[in-house]
Amino acid sequence: DQQVKQNSPSLSVQEGRISILNCDYTNSMFDYFLWYKKYPAEGPTFLISISSIKDKNEDGRFTVFLNKSAKHLSLHIVPSQPGDSAVYFCAAGEGKLIFGQGTTLQVKP
Amino acid sequence: DAGVIQSPRHEVTEMGQEVTLRCKPISGHDYLFWYRQTMMRGLELLIYFNNNVPIDDSGMPEDRFSAKMPNASFSTLKIQPSEPRDSAVYFCASSLVGAGYDVRDNEQFFGPGTRLTVL
């Protein structure tokens, strides 16, 4: 049973526009959430995180929103750049991290 | 710091053969994690260690999989015998803290992965 789900396998966005990646979870006990970014032939790298006591965290072009009542989080990238093209994983933590399936973002020039 | 080191980067083997994947975590990190990446399930946690002791191996698919951490700087994941459905990318990650109160304490640093193909 998948506790963390990313229902969109892929997303294509024009350069300069907003990219919105979504993630749903089932366990209300998760304490924190992280987004990781993965380029081909490399391991995932940390991008941004949010604690369950917050509803928003911003870091430059990246903002993560958390809606606990809906058990939903999203990652906004504004403006999107071609270098943002990668696979994005959301993860939820309760001592260990549970990862979603990933969403492949393509930002077109 | 060299980061998390994994070897080999690519492994091609035949069904029934033994496969051993290796990982060197970041020095000073107390936690080590083994993941498997597949298209269907994304990143699955297989097992993790704290101070060289296995804490949770509930993600290990079956008895064909085993993992060891003989010391703080080395871990292995072994598959014996290997099967075609084991083909995937296997990642090792390490972190300072496994369940810290500060979200950033829980950041895991991943190695480049081992792409395993079982024919």
Image (cartoon, coloured by chain):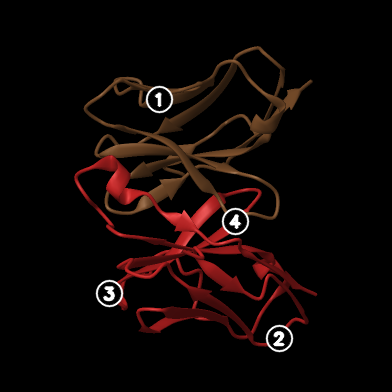
Chain colours: A brown, B red
Q: Pointers 3 and 1 in contact (CB under 8 A)?
A: no
Front: mark 4 or 3 = 3
Q: Which residue is mark 2?
A: B16
Q: Is residue A30 visible?
A: no
Do circles 3 and 1 both sit on a common chain? no
Q: Is residue B48 visible?
A: yes
Q: Residue at x 25, y 39 (%)?
A: A31
Q: Chain of mark 4?
A: B
Q: Report, in whole angstroms, how far the alpha carbon at label 4 lies from the one at label 2.
A: 21 Å
Q: Is residue B69 left or right of residue B97?
A: right
Q: Which residue is mark 4?
A: B37
Q: Is residue B63 left or right of residue A84?
A: left
Q: Which mark is residue A72?
A: 1
Q: Amino acid at mark 3?
A: Asn
Q: Which residue is mark 3?
A: B51
Front: mark 4 or 2 = 4
Sequence-first tag of 4 and 2: 2
Instruction: Kindly state the secondary structure of the residue where label 1 is placed.
Output: strand
